[in-house]
Amino acid sequence: MDQRPMPTRRRWVFFLSSPVSSYVHRRDMMKSTLLVIIVLLTSLLPAAALDANLTDGCVEDYAADVDYFPQKIEVVDAAKFTVEYFKSYKVVSVADAFDGATDFSYALVQCGTPAPSPADFPEGTQFIEVPTGALITLSTTQLPALSQLGLLDRLAGVDSGFYISTPEVAQRIAEGEIAEVGFGNQVNIELVLELEPQLVMSYGFNPASDAHPVLLEAGIFTALDASWRELSPLGRAEWIKFTALFYNEEERANAIYEDIAAQYEMVRERAAAAGAEERPAVLINSFLGYADAWFIPGEDTYVGQLIRDAGGDLLLAEAGSASSQGLGFEAVFEGGLNADVWLVETFGVNSSADMLALDSRFGDFAAFQSGELWNNNRDENANGGNNYYEWGVTNPQLVLADLLAIFHPDLMPDHEFAFYQRLASE
């Protein structure tokens, strides 16, 4: 018979015989069991969700089930770019960047997460880590978005500072902090490579003379900005979201664009208060002797929509047209002689005398004689760089307010013009 002592058993019996010690033991056991359950359940839960996009740095601990872009954009008015979100990357497509262009595709991959397989994307798709870093822009129209999004510190280069209106950029160019890399296919590739940009934002007109084919051949990530192809004023302004996508700044871009759109709609509604009989007949542009033509935009062009939304009727505009037509002087003289307002939109013209110097026949137009001659060059730099084509593109609500004040001054009695000015009478 086994006579070995059993101290543990006797001690266990003692514990069971004590009510207090029994309670303490059961409590400790329950705590231990609960802790094990919590650990097991925690291991089964998905990784903690992000409440904001990462605008600086990379993911340090990647989890496949985390949505790394909780703040997203929705394209509302722009027609030339789209975005589709996935958990750790977003696919941006640009359509109709220039005549005959096929779509351009960009897979924007959150830094610190695995890139998707190129086999799942169209040929030519660029895979770019976001948030991206140093940037070069090749159009002045891209600068306001960088300023509004607080990204000017990322700007390493521009095509040229000659026509730039954004003061912070002009100053940094003068101080040598931002380089000038040149235009089109003559862009200085050596300088671009020296600047080590993570992205160049370009545009397209003709691949034979554009910068983007040269940049891509050099292995430089290049995104095409097709905002100039948008017909809607708000559509052009919405390209601030396109820029934001590369920096995960969706939340800020949404807020900025919503404010622009709300202001635009407010001005449009005020213009709509004017009756049909109060809408002025508007003549635009001027006869270009070197082209032997007077170009009139169609009703559905960017300019046509601005004039319509501001409560004006664009004379000689082709109905349903999204392009401009070149007319002879006689045709415009006949159809626009009695226009109420003339938006001359002509470089170097600041006075009625300047108009007569271009063509003495301009003096016969009713708008010339009544002093209703306006140009969009109120804010030009010393080189003739016109801010209408820079900040005016991204802030159409300001352009619309100027036009409303011209067409219906009674509706905007205290308006301060941003881009337009009445030509001096000389």
Image: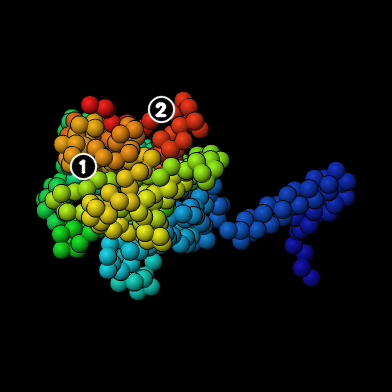
Q: Amino acid at mark 2?
A: Glu
Question: If the image is split into quadrants, where does the C terminus sit?
Answer: top left
Report helix, strand or loop for mark 1: helix
Q: Which of marks 1 and 2 precedes in the sequence?
A: 1
Q: Residue at x 49, y 30 (%)?
A: 410
Instruction: Please state the total of marks drawn on the protein image.
Output: 2
Which of the pair 291/353 is nearer the observer? 353
One can see residue 18 in this view = yes
Q: Which residue is mark 1?
A: 361
Report helix, strand or loop for mark 2: loop
User: On the rendered structure, is 33 left or right of 367?
Assistant: right
One can see residue 11 in this view = no
Which of the pair 202/227 is nearer the observer? 227
User: Which label is found at residue 416?
Assistant: 2
User: Which label is found at residue 209?
Assistant: none
User: Residue 210, percent across and down?
Assistant: 18, 58
288 lies above or below 350? below
Q: Nearer the viewer, mark 2 or mark 1?
A: 1
Q: Amino acid at mark 1?
A: Arg
Q: Residue at x 23, y 55 (%)?
A: 328
